[in-house]
Image (tube, rainbow, N blue to C red):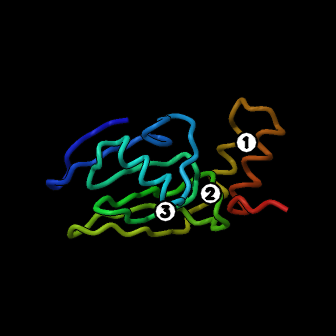
Amino acid sequence: MDSFEMFGKRCVACHAAPSDPLFRYLRTSEKVLADEIRVAGSPDFLFFGHTHWPLLHQVGTTTIINPGSAGQPKDGDTRSPYAVWEDGKIELRRIAYPMEATVQAYARTPLASSEVESLIAVLRTGGTLP
């Protein structure tokens, strides 16, 4: 978990959740989010990832942002998600990208072929596997 100031606002960023920065899956339950905000010290903005699900949500005075995952989306949308902070507001956006270049890059990794196939399937379906 890392605390910093940006544009005069107190921010906390972590991979997963303030209570477990590496492994916890942080979902949208108001109580869970409020608990995580308290653990983070009630920042103005809480940035996290790990779930591969984009999220922009307000709990009290804290804005919670998860931009999603560009290479392994889990929300059914294959476009690359990202967040933009402009004029004091945050917006989640999506953009199409050359997915086949990523597929080819996966194929060049030293991973087992079954793992590569799984990564490619998630990439091509946005995580909505049959």
Direction from residue 17 to residue 8 in the image, left or right: left
Mark 2, other Cα within 10 Å: few <14 / some 14–19 / many ≥20: many
Residue 59: percent from left, percent from top: 37, 62
Residue marked by disc 3: 55
114 is higher (above) or lower (below) than 123: above
Give me the residue at 28% from left, 62% from top.
61
Q: Residue at x 54, y 62 (%)?
A: 80
Q: Is residue 53 left or right of residue 65?
A: right
Instruction: Please name the residue shown 44% across and 61% down the image.
Output: 82
The residue under label 1 is 107
Between marks 3 and 1, how big is the CA–CA gap? 30 Å
Q: Which mark is residue 48?
A: none
- Quadrant in which the C terminus is drawn: bottom right
Which of 27 and 128 lies nearest the eye of the viewer? 27
**Residue lying at the far left of the rendered structure:** 8
How many residues crowd mark 3 within 10 Å: few (<14), some (14–19), many (20+)?
A: some
Residues at marks 2 and 1, CA–CA distance in whole angstroms? 18 Å
Q: Vertically, is 89 above or below 23?
A: below
Mark 2: which secondary structure? loop
Q: Nearer the viewer, residue 35 or 86?
A: 35
Q: State left or right for residue 106 relative to residue 6.
A: right
x%, y% of residue 28?
Answer: 53, 60
Q: Secondary structure at mark 3?
A: strand
Q: Which residue is mark 2?
A: 73
